Image (cartoon, rainbow, N blue to C red):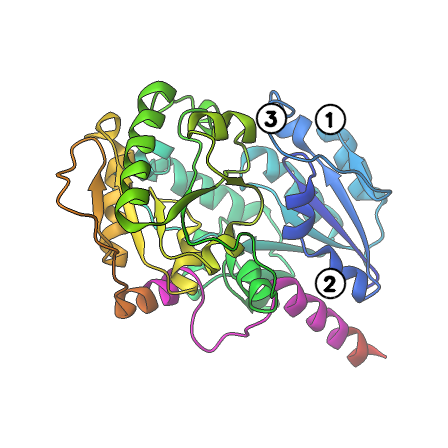
Amino acid sequence: MNKVVVLISRRFNVFTKDRLGFKFFQASKIEIEVWDLADIYLEKPDSLGSPSYETFDGLHTFKKMSNVKVAIENECLSTLFICSIPFSNQSKEIFQSLTKKKQPYLVRQTKMHPNAKSFNKYLGNNNLKSKIRFFFSWRRKILPPKYVILATDFSKYYLPFKVGRNTNIIKAHVDDYNYYLGELKNESVAYSGNYVVFIDQNLSGNSDFNLLKKTFPVTSEKYFSSLNNFFNLIEKQLNVEVVIAAHPKSTLEFLSKQLSNRRVFYNCTARLIKNCKFVLGHYSTAYNFAVLFSKPILSLTTSELYNTPIEDQIKFITNLLDSPLIDIDNYENTGIVVPQVNMDYYRSYEEKYIKEGGTLRKNTWHILTDLLKKEDDSKS
């Protein structure tokens, strides 16, 4: 394998580069191209707050689906397409083009965050009849992928098309595990203070709510006032500092100002959690790092989230992890207790939603490039 083409549905940035394992392809001397299809998938691709846009010689931007189809037709058959795009009707056209040419491609199903039923409905994931109709339309018309990367064995049921007999199934883990492995080898620290970390989810301004056509679940004025009051209480009672792990789409200056100029860190959530006393949050997927590093979790809700799908999701996650939940707008100040870790619950959560036992403790892309090299060696 001499070349891979990665298809993405959002703008290419530093996070994308890291998530797609560039260094592993480069180390294996595999040429890599990225086809940016954000203009095709999104109405306003540059308005989503994606950080640190990057460019490189192999980055190509497409504005029309017809141009993507022509590019696929002109690509060498030995090129592997890595499809980091949603399973949507737009993507279906791309997979049909790959099928028509019999072009080898890879798909991943490495997101296994558990959701409460009401939260799934809120996200628009519960239309069963539509899902069944969509699933079978894909099965009839799409050539099975050459490679499938799965987080767990259960992940394959989230694929909309049939896995063929010749499909190479690669059992790996969720993407967060890659960052966890990197931090195990990293001796540097994000912050050396005595601190707890709050995982920001940008609830008052995340553009994902716009994509879902939902109003923001909280208002900035009320939400940040509630957080600040509770953070002040924690800092006073436990003699710790509350620092903030910023959401990728948050604005650092705004976040710091709203949270009384507390320290805000960007793009180092795993490292912050690795060395913290415990974790504060709502229902973030970054709880994966707390589980992997065996850090206690204290989940927070507010009066603005009462009886909403988001509060249902917070409660659902806390039950899975056996972690305490505090309503920071209706909290009896009898003394904050540092939460404890129930390791049985943490290990069960890891096995179901992060990484199954017995799978390789290696970066996903390292697993893939090793496999590609092994296949090339067997042909020579």
Q: Secondary structure at mark 2?
A: helix
Amino acid type assigned to the residue bearing label 2 in the image: Phe
Within the magenta stretch, is there residue 122? no
Q: Which badge, 3 or 1, is on the more N-terminal residue?
A: 3
In the rendered image, residue 376, in percent from the top left (x then y), is placed at 80, 73
At 59% across and 70% down in the image, what residue appears? 362
Q: Residues within 10 Å of mark 2 (few under 14, many from 20)?
A: some
Q: CA distance from mark 2 to mark 3?
A: 29 Å
Q: CA distance from mark 2 to mark 1?
A: 30 Å
Residue indicated by mark 1: 64
In the rendered view, would you say 212 is above or below 164?
A: above
In the rendered view, would you say 149 is above or below 324?
A: below
At 38% across and 57% down in the image, what residue appears? 277
Residue 24 is marked as: 2
In the rendered view, would you say 78 is above or below 306?
A: below
Main SS class of the magenta portion in the image: helix
Amino acid type assigned to the residue bearing label 1 in the image: Lys
Q: Residues within 10 Å of mark 3 (few under 14, many from 20)?
A: some
Quadrant placement of the N terminus: bottom right
Residue stretch rendered in magenta on the structure:
349-375
Circles 2 and 1, Cβ within 8 Å, touching? The answer is no
Q: Is residue 203 left or right of residue 121?
A: right
Residue indicated by mark 3: 42
Q: Is residue 167 visible?
A: no
In the rendered image, residue 299, in percent from the top left (x then y), is placed at 28, 46
